[in-house]
Amino acid sequence: MINVPSTVKIAFRALRVNKMRSALTMLGIIIGVAAVVTMLAIGSGASKMIEEQISSIGSNLLMIVPGSTSAGGMRMGSGSQPTLTIWDAEAILKECPSVLDVAPVISGTCQIVYGNQNWSTGVFGTTPNMLNVRDWPLASGRPFRDQDVRSSTKVCLLGKTVIDNLFGSIDPVGKIVRIKKVPFTVIGVLEPKGQSLMGQDNDDIVYVPVSTAQKKLFGTLFPGMIRLIMVKAKSLDALAKAEVEVTDLLRQRHHIVHKQEDDFSVRNLTQMFQIAENSMKIFSLLLGSIASVSLLVGGIGIMNIMLVSVTERTREIGIRMAVGAKTWDIRLQFLIEALILSLIGGSVGIAIGVSGATVLSAMAGWPTIVSPLSIILAFGFSGMVGIFFGFYPAYKASLLNPIEALRYE
Amino acid sequence: MELIELKEINKVYKIGDIGVHALNNVSLIIKKGEFVAIIGPSGSGKSTFMNVIGCLDQPTTGRYLLEGTDIGSLSRDKLAEIRNKKIGFVFQGFNLLSRATSLENVELPMLYNGFSAKERRQRALPALEAVGLKGREKHHPNQLSGGEQQRVAIARALVNNSSIILADEPTGNLDTKTSKEIMELFVKLNTESNITIILVTHELDIAAYSRRIIKFSDGFVVSDEVKKSMEHGAR
Ligand SMILES: Nc1ncnc2c1ncn2[C@@H]1O[C@H](COP(=O)(O)OP(=O)(O)OP(=O)(O)O)[C@@H](O)[C@H]1O
Ligand SMILES: [Mg+2]
């Protein structure tokens, strides 16, 4: 039969008397909870990013681009032209056992016109394999076939953003669009993938047969030239093996001798995400240790202040005991006070943590997600700190001898 | 069944190897509705006696029956409940909560027996009025005179319909005129509401308000006199 509302009121009054002291006591909790919230926001942002990257680009991918990379970044292989061809792509598919599928890409930004609407977007010349490599189904229509690549037909697949901008609500399948003034028939519509966390629009895209792109849209310095080869390994475990196989094969095909540098570079997309994920995780871990230390310090601070408060209010405790306060009445009074301290600190910490996450994603470009669960978790955690560290002072108060407490000066 | 029955109560404080006998073989009965004054020199055990009958302290040996209940067998919380329901304390130093208003101070005992905020208010207001403090509900102790503070303490002691008021030198900090007013309030409560009043005092003219005077010396009860006349001496 403990009177909670009145006890809460009493606690607030006691805390108001020492505003500055109460505020300083909360500081540790504030910092700790802010760090927890930011940490969780970065953590879930990181895993969401990985998930999204994989679903938007495709899983188990290698990207092969012309030119070598060295410590200074990208630079061209000595004296040679960038030399990736569609035949390299075909050879990889044929000869590398760990590779599931391969798609070559030649790309550029082009103006597309339908009726009086026009839209500028990335046009990608590729093979039918691309949809498999990127795990990308069609929403309607048909994909282009090997036949389309062989005979350089002028057909294209459109992403949702392009359709929205050119067609509105009209069904685009079968319609003719002009890409760089060349008429193409729309044969299919790509399933929308949506915006990535990094803010790029996956659906702002046009696919055309690679041969058509080479001949009609971009032109080539040498026959079969492409910009990029996307390679899909058979599994995540096969990825590293595929990387070795592809490198060996291309060195052999490009006649690169023993000590010479590659004239191409293989990027392991999954690895790149993992590196990004790792740096985010390390930062999370750092925040996590800051959080635990400051929560501990904050908790001890609360305990300290509550002990002081119990001593200062010994006489008050004696009066309450004399008029009938029981053990748990006294305990609860001080526990609630500690709880209020820690929960206010927790709320302020949550507010700071949420804005910290926002600032961080703006400054470092890291996607952060503040989930309701993490807020509940942080709030609950600060409450637990309050109860844990408030218990001893409350316990001590409840064991005071009423006569001695009444006599206390 | 008597209201208060003490049987060979001893209270010994041990300080190092020396035992201080604050109470020595105290046996007595106090009936409902009595008005008792406790007198005696400083250090004679008066406050210790009050603490024992107020269930704030336990005797070292001996039995204390309050309305037939043996207090010695009760837990801390049970004692708190008895203090809450049956006993009201009035102290020399008032012992009010300084951060609370007089109304809140009077409501305090009811905080611990499950009354709602509304019920607390409904009972505290008349209690304050009964001690003549209507209009002082929102005052804090430091905005009240000593006499007024002691009235708040008396209202607090009354508010739970306690049948016993224990007052340890209630007028010790008050001037003669105010002391007289407080004593008259006690007399009124005693005669009109049949509340048992036990008070400790150093002053004989305060003791004269009572109908029975118990004198302590070195922890012994050295005299226990009931006045023949029902008249109160100082009136
Ligand atoms: N907590 C304690 N520890 C040790 N000795 C105590 C304690 N409380 C009281 N005493 C001793 O017990 C004796 C009785 O004390 P008590 O307070 O009952 O006296 P009193 O009659 O109320 O005196 P006063 O008139 O000065 O208030 C004293 O000798 C005192 O020193
Ligand atoms: Mg005394």
Image (cartoon, rainbow, N blue to C red):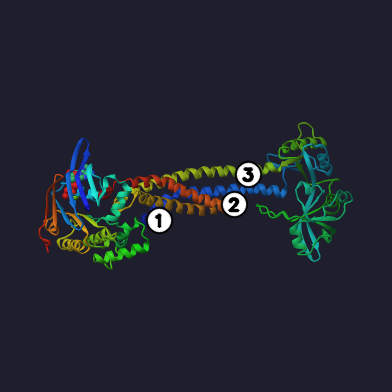
Front residue of this view, candidates B130 and A214: B130
- Which image quarter: residue A116? bottom right
- Which image quarter: residue B97? bottom left
**Crowdedness of circle 2 by 10 Å Cα count: few (<14), some, many (20+)?**
many
Front residue of this view, candidates B175 and A295: B175
Question: In the rendering, at what x and y percent does residue A182 appear?
Answer: 85, 58
Residue type at numbered disc 2:
Ile
Respond yes or no on whether mark 1 lies under 8 Å from ligand 1.
no
Structural distance between the alpha carbons of marks 1 and 2: 36 Å
Upstream in the sequence, badge 1 or badge 3? 1
Residue type at numbered disc 1:
Val
Q: Which residue is mark 1?
A: A4
Same chain under badges 1 and 2? The reply is: yes
**Crowdedness of circle 1 by 10 Å Cα count: few (<14), some, many (20+)?**
some
SS at mark 2?
A: loop
Q: Is residue A266 above or below residue B114?
A: above
Q: Chain of mark 2?
A: A
Q: Chain of mark 1?
A: A
Q: Which residue is mark 3?
A: A277
- Which image quarter: residue A167? bottom right
Respond yes or no on whether mark 2 lies under 8 Å from ligand 1.
no
Residue type at numbered disc 3:
Glu
Q: Which dot, 1 or 2, sits closer to the camera?
A: 1
Front residue of this view, candidates B177 and A277: B177
Could you tell me if residue B45 is visible in this image? no
